[in-house]
Image (cartoon, rainbow, N blue to C red):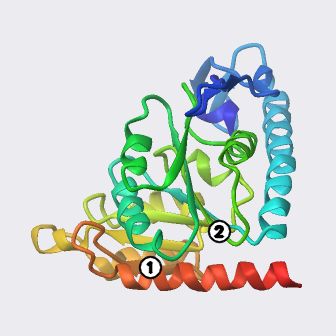
Amino acid sequence: MCTVCGCNETKHTHGHGHSHDHDYSHEHKHLHDYGKSESGLHVAGMSQEKIIQVEIDILAKNNNYANQNRDFFRQNGILALNLVSSPGSGKTTTLETTLKILKKTISLKVIEGDQQTTQDVDRIKKTGVEAIQVNTGKGCHLDAHMVGHAFEALKLEEDSLLFIENVGNLVCPAAFDLGEHCKVAILSVTEGEDKPLKYPDMFAAADLMLLNKIDLLPHLNFDVERCIAYARQVNPKIQVLQISATTGEGMDGWYQWISAQMDSTKAFKAK
């Protein structure tokens, strides 16, 4: 939540140059000291009860926006996937490889979330897929309001696929519903197999874990089965696919998973 994660900057800029202030930015606090209260958090001038209420208010407003986004996606048969990971997992590379294959048969759009720069959105645009950048400033996650404004600018088509690449962070994006169909957690084998236990909220919120960079396994001391067991310890229902976005190994299984989710989305629209 914002009182915990420290994202006090909610002004964001889209790729077309438009900027606006989030309408609950006044609730974001920026002075944090840890180990001062029952939850380990002290914010100057605020009681523990006030901190909890601020967190509840922020998430409630976010969830209202998320529900609006979700209704729009469902009514138009749009599959929205929220890609989450720590920095360096290969999230953007995975997305690039995916877009190059799927753009031949599916209408695709991308929302790129980063604190600063347009480097990733520039990479995505080189695939020929339309994308828009959302820079969060000091914010460490996208929220549903940001995503709503971004996809309005993208003018999504019916029965299409929207990828949302979240800010690299395995903590706060877990708590913020964007109205997506699924969260997809991407974990690199270079990060260590214990990440699902260290960041359980993220893996509990994800429907799918992509275990990326498996081409590097011969050079690493990484226990694949233990990693998968840890992920299922925090989320027994999580699906796991092993991939290499650079070599293409395992990517067909990822594309098949996406196809099945699109069929589900279209079936819901048809009801």
Nearer to the camera, 156 or 245: 156
Q: Residue at x 46, y 28 (%)?
A: 116
Element marked by disc 1: helix
Image quadrant assignment for residue 8: top right
- The residue at the point 80 percent across, 37 percent down is 58
Residue drawn at (60%, 22%) of the image:
32
The percent position of residue 28, horizontal first and vertical second, equals 72, 25
Q: Which mark is residue 254?
A: 1
Q: Residues within 10 Å of mark 1 (few under 14, many from 20)?
A: some
The quadrant of the rendering that contains the N terminus is: top right
Residue 88: % across, % down: 32, 49
Label 1 – label 2 distance at C-alpha: 17 Å
Whichever of callouts 1 and 2 sits on the residue coming sooner in the sequence is: 2
Q: Is residue 38 above or below residue 157?
A: above
Q: How many C-alpha atoms fall within 10 Å of the one at disc 2: few (<14), some, or many (≥20)? A: some
Residue 78 spot, x, y in % from top left: 71, 68
Residue carrying label 2: 160
| 1 relative position to 139: left or right | right
Instruction: Give the foreground label among 1 and 2.
Output: 2
Q: Residue placed farthest to the left in the image?
A: 219
Q: Image quadrant for the C terminus?
A: bottom right
In x, y percent, where is residue 136?
Answer: 58, 31
Q: Amino acid at mark 1?
A: Trp
Quadrant assignment, res 19: top right
